[in-house]
């Protein structure tokens, strides 16, 4: 009997288990938390903060779990077109509303995770064991299982680490004599503070979402409609300019955003809880793809490999793209092939998000003449997207990872950006 063990039952772990169920007789998911229904939990503190699902991620999730978008809509999670009933402000300017062909699914993160979990556990051979923590790997040249913190050992032909950014895999591998991955970091010292409110239809003139980028300046935020007629409001601040969690100071911070839309909700709507803070030091990438002989029988996926600045809402989509890459490596996933394929998808998101972060002079990191030109062009494209629907559509599609960033460099788009991107 072929058995795989997946460590972590969040988005990356669940998608991996779903994919592995196509090739393995049994897939055991080991999760440290108790999991009960649709609620934030200790191991996923970020679930209390605004989570946008990019269209490429939604498409992959829909491919793995057909009908999931409609099911969530049936549970009250609104769906809309990205630039319809939604307001996007980049550099303080509203992206021109136009048709994009992109769907926004406005489900709260706990609801999305629980819907994915429910369907994953309905896949053949998949089992979830909660309140069990992985504490190390077993094996030598090849990984043959995992040791849990209670001393139990689970044998497996394949172990997949989806334990998130705090993954201990580098130490576990070093303990068995394997190479540790090099780490790349771009520190941004980002702070979030989030709160939910009761939504009334007249708020935001009936629109369902607003996103305000942290440019110009350091402050941004967003408000999205959640199932249950609620607003989920997140305020954000870069480079130490963090939003407070005291209710009055939260409101005052919202008033300082470049546009008033989020503040209008905060000011008018009835709060349902107190603001919750979160601190994110910076993007982190572990280069498993650069290890020349990674051990067989073990793969790392999701935030455990690449954890992105959440302002760009890429993490769940990149986890989904990695799950698809895993599927392509079945039935006998080879780590070199897997890491090569996943590095290609991580590269795109990493360059987009760290490229945006490096616009801030206070963010340390490698800058080249090329990256400066790309940064200046991207700034112009954001202004042009305010005026030109073709640029707006293309920009939103690249941001949603449905087309490559190079799509912004076709002669027609370059002309539009240069002609219409002046301040
Ligand atoms: C503040 C914030 C906002 C974000 N916003 C967005 C967004 O808008 N859009 C987006 O796409 N992404 C966003 N992300 C990223 C997104 O949350 C992650 O990319 C996504 O959850 C996938 O992560 P993961 O499954 O790899 O790991 P995680 O979600 O971190 O889950 C790891 C899981 O492993 C479990 N675990 C940990 N250690 C062990 C162990 N030893 N044994 C067993 N289980 C263990 C944990 O309990 C948890 O269930 C955001 C992240 C942050 C921090």
Image (spheres, rainbow, N blue to C red):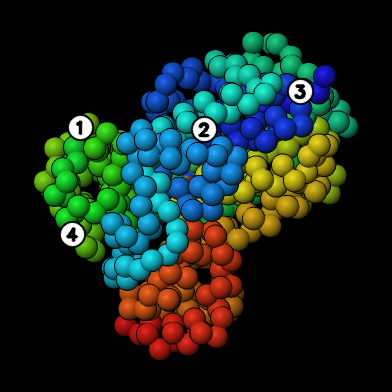
Disc 3 or 4, which lies upstream in sequence? 3
Q: Which element carries disc 2, helix, strand or loop?
A: helix
Q: Is residue 287 above or below residue 69?
A: below
Disc 2 or 1, which lies upstream in sequence? 2
Bin the neighbour count of mark 2 within 10 Å (Cα to Cα): few under 14, some 14-19, many 20 and up: many
**Quarter of the image containing the C terminus?**
bottom left
Disc 1 or 4, which lies upstream in sequence? 4
User: Residue 93: percent from the left, percent from the top?
Assistant: 29, 70
Distance CA(mark 2)–CA(mark 4): 35 Å
Disc 3 or 2, which lies upstream in sequence? 3
Disc 1 or 3, which lies upstream in sequence? 3
The image quarter in which residue 275 lies: top left
Q: Is residue 42 above or below residue 223?
A: above
Q: Which mark is residue 272?
A: 1
Nearer to us in this view, 28 or 115: 115
Which residue in the structure is indicated by mark 3? 25
Q: Which element carries disc 1, helix, strand or loop?
A: loop
Which residue in the structure is indicated by mark 4? 260
Nearer to us in this view, 311 or 13: 13
Q: Residue at x 43, y 69 (%)?
A: 393
User: Residue 67: percent from the left, percent from the top?
Assistant: 50, 39
Which residue in the structure is indicated by mark 2? 116
Bin the neighbour count of mark 3 within 10 Å (Cα to Cα): few under 14, some 14-19, many 20 and up: some
Bin the neighbour count of mark 4 within 10 Å (Cα to Cα): few under 14, some 14-19, many 20 and up: few
Q: Is residue 106 above or below residue 213?
A: above
User: Residue 358: percent from the left, percent from the top?
Assistant: 49, 65
Do the numbered discs 2 and 1 sit on residues whose CB atoms are within 8 Å? no
Disc 2 or 4, which lies upstream in sequence? 2
Q: Which element carries disc 3, helix, strand or loop?
A: loop
Distance CA(mark 3)–CA(mark 4): 54 Å
């Amino acid at each position: 009997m072929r058995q795989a063990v997946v460590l972590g039952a969040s988005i990356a772990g669940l998608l991996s288990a779903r994919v592995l169920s196509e090739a393995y007789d049994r897939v055991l998911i080991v999760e440290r938390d108790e999991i009960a229904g649709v609620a934030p939990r200790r191991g996923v503190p970020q679930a209390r903060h605004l989570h946008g699902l990019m269209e490429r991620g939604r498409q992959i999730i829909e491919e793995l779990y057909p009908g999931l978008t409609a099911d969530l809509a049936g549970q009250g999670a609104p769906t809309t077109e990205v630039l319809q009933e939604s307001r996007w402000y980049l550099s303080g300017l509203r992206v021109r509303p136009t048709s994009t062909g992109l769907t926004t699914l406005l489900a709260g993160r706990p609801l999305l995770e629980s819907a994915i979990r429910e369907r994953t556990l309905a896949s053949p051979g998949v089992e979830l064991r909660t309140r069990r923590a992985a504490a190390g790997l077993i094996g030598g040249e090849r990984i043959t299982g995992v040791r849990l913190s209670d001393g139990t050992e689970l044998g497996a032909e394949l172990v997949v680490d989806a334990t998130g950014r705090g993954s201990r895999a580098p130490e576990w591998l070093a303990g068995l004599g394997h190479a540790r991955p090099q780490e790349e970091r771009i520190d941004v010292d980002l702070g979030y503070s989030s709160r939910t409110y009761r939504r009334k239809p007249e708020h935001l003139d009936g629109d369902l979402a607003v996103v305000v980028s942290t440019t110009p300046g350091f402050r941004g935020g967003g408000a999205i409609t959640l199932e249950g007629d609620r607003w989920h409001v997140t305020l954000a601040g870069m480079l130490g300019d963090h939003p407070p969690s005291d209710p009055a100071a939260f409101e005052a911070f919202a008033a300082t955003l470049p546009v008033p839309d989020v503040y209008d909700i905060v000011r008018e709507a009835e709060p349902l809880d107190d603001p919750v803070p979160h601190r994110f030091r910076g993007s982190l990438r572990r280069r498993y793809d650069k290890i020349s002989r990674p051990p067989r029988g073990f793969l790392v996926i999701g935030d455990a490999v690449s954890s992105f600045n959440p302002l760009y809402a890429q993490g769940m989509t990149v986890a989904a793209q990695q799950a698809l890459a895993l599927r392509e490596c079945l039935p006998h996933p080879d780590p070199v092939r897997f890491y090569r394929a996943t590095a290609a998808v991580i590269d795109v998101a990493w360059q987009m998000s760290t490229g945006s972060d490096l616009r801030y002079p206070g963010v340390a990191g490698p800058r080249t003449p090329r990256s400066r030109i790309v940064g200046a062009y991207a700034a112009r494209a954001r202004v042009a997207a305010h005026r030109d629907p073709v640029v707006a559509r293309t920009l939103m599609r690249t941001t949603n990872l449905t087309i490559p960033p190079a799509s912004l460099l076709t002669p027609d788009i370059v002309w539009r950006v240069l002609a219409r991107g002046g301040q």
